[in-house]
Image (spheres, rainbow, N blue to C red):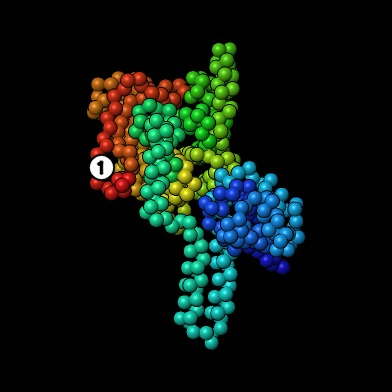
Amino acid sequence: MIELPLIPPQAIEVEEAILGALILESTAIIENHINSNWFYKNEHQIIAREIVEMHKNGKKIDLITVTQHLRDKSLFEEIGGISVITGLTRQVASAIHLKQHLKIIQDKFTRRELIRITHEVNKFAYNESMDLEDIISKLHSNTLEVMEFNTDTVHTFKDALDLLWQRIKQNEKSVGMTGIPTGFEKLNRMTGGWQGSDLVVVAGETSQGKTSLALNFTVNAGLFNCAGVIYSLEMSLIQLTARIVSSYTDVCSKRILFESLTPMEMIQINDGISKLSNMPIYTDDNVNNSIESICLSIRRMKLKYDIQFAVVDYVQNIKEIAGKNEEGSIGTIMKMLKNLAKELNITIFAVSQLRRNNNSPIPSIQRLRGSGQIEETADIIITIYRPEYYNLEFPEPFESEDTLNKGMITIAKGRNIGTGAFMVNFKKSTTTFTDVIENRVNVDYEESENEDENPF
């Protein structure tokens, strides 16, 4: 059997999108570090190299100037002529996704370089006339060169202060809301809306409504035209959709799925669907229950739809990582989700189970099922408690509140925002949480002993 050679890692379409963005927007080359070696296709390397050279020489970058520059250097026909250049600009409408695209080709370039280095070191290792220390030294130096290509990840403290000042000025314009609307007045007040790069854990015991709350967050964001994606490892697409429609229309999801609806319910469903159908909310049927598959899909969704958030329901249903126990697996999964949220500057909601405690069912961080690393990694941990389910009362300071159709949402950990609790309404027939008007809030903004909780 003939073994065909493997194709080196590459992303030709992404390379085309990057070059098109550089030609379309003159500021793109100023705001991003570009290395022509990152490109796999020879023609793309030439175009990238010449654009970088033009920028260094202070020349304007656009379709006409790049074309003329390539003609002047007798490179125009070598890169494929006018059809190639104009084709690049048709690949993109703007440079909005350029940073994400650059990360992709940087990744492919690194992999190609590692393949080259390992082949080279492999030959050296077979050559016993070479000194072993020289081989190891060459391996180290080559590897360092590969990993140091992304110079735009290094920032001075002045850069950091500039970013902070931009956020302060942005907050002035946003009048308290800097992130994705949560749908809950008190939560908006505490968080300023869901923030990019945050990993938010939504936790509760079975039947407390953790999935419902995550879906409420999804609908509340979608109705404000905030794009997001949902990964449900428990429900089918039609079940998930029925839950969302139910929460918005006030028609029980069981009736939507299995029963004949009344004329009034049909009107409610029809009206609800017409409003919900425009929400930029997505699912991906190509995803399995591995963290690698989920993360890959989130990256695709960010590139294709510019999503602002993702919901993973729920963490304990993600397949364990080979060679690790449940605690080690969940710890790794949480770190991967947090790193992805930070890289893509999106909010990721990770729904998580709490261990049962029949003697004291009031939620606590210590009962997060599977790993103490959930607490360590998460930026915000939200717990849900409905004492009506257990025939119990609310804890202080809500002990006088009626438990009928009520719940307590607690921010048990809030990096940068503090902790607190507030009451919400809960409708069992549609598993929907809504605001309680004029409800009390117990918020603690004291600094945490954990230095990670202090933004400054």
Of residue 48 and residue 419, the one placed in the foreground of this image is 48
Residue 22: x percent and y percent? 61, 51
Residue 8, by quadrant, is bottom right
Residue 57: x percent and y percent? 58, 60
Write down the residue under mark 1: 447
The N terminus lies in quadrant: bottom right
Does residue 255 sit above or below 345 in this rendering?
above
Secondary structure at badge 1 equals loop
Does residue 164 sit above or below 207 in this rendering?
below
Q: Is residue 382 left or right of residue 297?
A: left
Q: Residue at x 55, y 41 (%)?
A: 306
Residue type pointed to by label 1: Glu
- Name of the residue lying farthest toward the front: 58
Of residue 364 and residue 322, the one placed in the foreground of this image is 364
Query: Would residue 358 be visible to someone looking at this image?
Result: no
- Name of the residue lying farthest toward the top: 263
Of residue 201 and residue 359, the one placed in the foreground of this image is 201
Residue 439: x percent and y percent? 31, 22
